[in-house]
Amino acid sequence: MNLSLQIQQIAAETLENLYQESFTVSDFQINETKPEFEGNYTIVLFALVKRLKKSPDAIGQELGQTLIEKHPELFTGFNIIKGFLNLTISDEYYKSILLRFNNDVCFGKHPMNGKKVMVEYSSPNTNKPLHLGHLRNNFLGWSVAEILKANGYEVYKSCIVNDRGIHICKSMVAWQLFANGATPESTNTKGDHFVGDYYVKFNDAYKKEIAEGIAAGLSEAEAEKNAPIMKLTQQMLVDWEAGKPEVMDLWKKMNAWVYKGFDVTYASIGSDFDKIYYESNTYLLGKDTVQKGLEKGIFYKKDDGSVWIDLQPDGLDEKLLLRKDGTSVYITQDIGLAMQKYEEYKIDKSIYVIGDEQNYHMKVLQLIAQKLGLPYGNDIHHLSYGMVELPSGKMKSREGTVVDADDLVDEMRNTAKQHTESLGKVKDFNPEELNQLYSTIGLGAMKFYLLRVDPKKKMIFNPEESIDFHGFTGPFIQYSYARIKSILRKEEPISTPSSFSSPLLPLEKKLLFELEQYPQILSTAGNALDPSVLANFLFQLAKSFNAFYAEHSISNAENEEKKQLRLALIGMIANVIQSGMQLLGIRVPERM
Ligand code: ARG
């Protein structure tokens, strides 16, 4: 059990015995003691004043005194400053943590809790390659899934591929019109990029036709509606839903190109899934369910035949569920998908990692699930994240200036290479080890930078800053890890003694104080679905290690016992860094 919870419990018991009043843990707010005061943890006394009708100082005196008398194994001193009781935790407590966990690679992880959760992330459309926004999405989803596992959940990682619909038909029509039979192989292009190029070509042609329509005297809306290429596309969607063989063949062929490309990207960024859903499978269940909802009067049909739900009583709008030609829209498939997820996996909670531009869509999905009386209506959780931009400005796909994920990953690797070469520390690495190292650093830099921010916040990804070996970065933590590993290699074999007799130095105690909080950090990050909590913790730990190492020698410690204690201590730091970084999806190198 983590120390601040232990303190709350002991404080509650102690006050109950002192004053014959009942207290619970929530009556005690515990903070870290401010650095200017003596102590490690602080109890806020003000909240108790009213109930006990005593001054904060009097309560603090009695509580502090009793704590050190009754629990000398935990508390060795106290002081009271302006209504705050500062408690000093015993060296013995921290030494026992060190002895117990220094070699435990599972330290911090929680036992299974019997709950199942699905985390859906990435979820691309098949008309274009992944971009910078998908990277934030993938890193976030993957990490949240791993953090939930560390919290004892049984986790299923999933992805919905939106493999059908008007957007894919656009790429397909453009390919028919402009490709002359070209393929990814014949043009030596990665499949997802190839198909994405035709999506861009569609939009160029569409724009041109609109301009021509306007020049011929049409209004803009009419020109958009009458553009021949758009009509072809709409017809193709109808043909697709009718299962017309030539359309299905083309669709299968082009999607297969895209999947081959996606696989390469996922392998390069380390994303994986336990279950991949395809909209082409989920949308029919969605359509069925809409039909049933229509019969039950939850949805209604307009004169043109389109189906809607009125969410105005819920403060939203009317929302289209089926087009007038009967074709399914984005929300239709999500209704089917939500049902499939629950039926197949019997999950307790369903998390969707989707950008905040779809907040409204997800609100609608939750409301529809509730109105349809689906048993999990309240367990659909949207993990909404903010947009990412590069320092140079926005990313837009229509204009073809999107920041491509593959390009960015390559660029990160190259930058990692330059930085590593300029340090000149890896001369004896073979080419394969070097490649591995550049990936580890380049990807680590990008993942950490994107994950160190609260997911809800929009952010700017600065590639140059992300790889600064001295900054608030992944490579700084990786470098600290490699430093520890290099110290440990020189001292092998290490045998940790069964006790340490000399007192802890302040910086030793500070490191143990931080390490002790790791299990709690994992719970907090899991409950908040926020990897940045973990990223910040790991950065602080790496900083504290470096501060410690600047002051104290390990190999030439004051005496043999100190040396052993510090070796155990840095070994535990290395384990926690490795375990925490793994939960962020980031590898740590033994040397760099
Ligand atoms: N494919 C969609 C897009 O690119 C995102 C899908 C998110 N997941 C979902 N269940 N709606 O916008």
Image (spheres, rainbow, N blue to C red):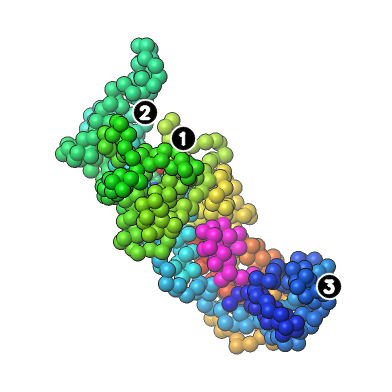
Taking the image as drawn, is residue 531 in sight? Answer: no
Direction from residue 213 to residue 133 in the image, left or right:
right
Residue topped by disc 1: 396
| Gap between marks 2 and 3 measured at Cα | 73 Å
Please say if the residues under marks 2 and 3 sit with CB atoms less than 8 Å apart: no
Please say if the residues under marks 3 and 1 sit with CB atoms less than 8 Å apart: no
Give the main secondary structure, helix, strand or loop, of the magenta stretch: helix
Looking at the picture, tell me which residue is in the foreground, 549 or 2. Answer: 2
| Gap between marks 2 and 1 measured at Cα | 13 Å
Q: Earlier in the sequence, mark 2 or mark 1?
A: 2
Q: Point out residue 2 in the picture as x, y percentages from the top left corner.
A: 60, 75
Q: Secondary structure at mark 2?
A: helix
Circle 2: residue type: Asn
In magenta segment, residue 572:
no
**Could you tell me which quadrant the N terminus lies in?**
bottom right
Looking at the picture, tell me which residue is in the foreground, 274 or 54. Answer: 54
* Furthest residue toward front: 297
Front: mark 2 or 3: 3
Residue topped by disc 3: 55
The part of the chain drawn in magenta is 512-538
Q: Earlier in the sequence, mark 3 or mark 1?
A: 3
Residue topped by disc 2: 203
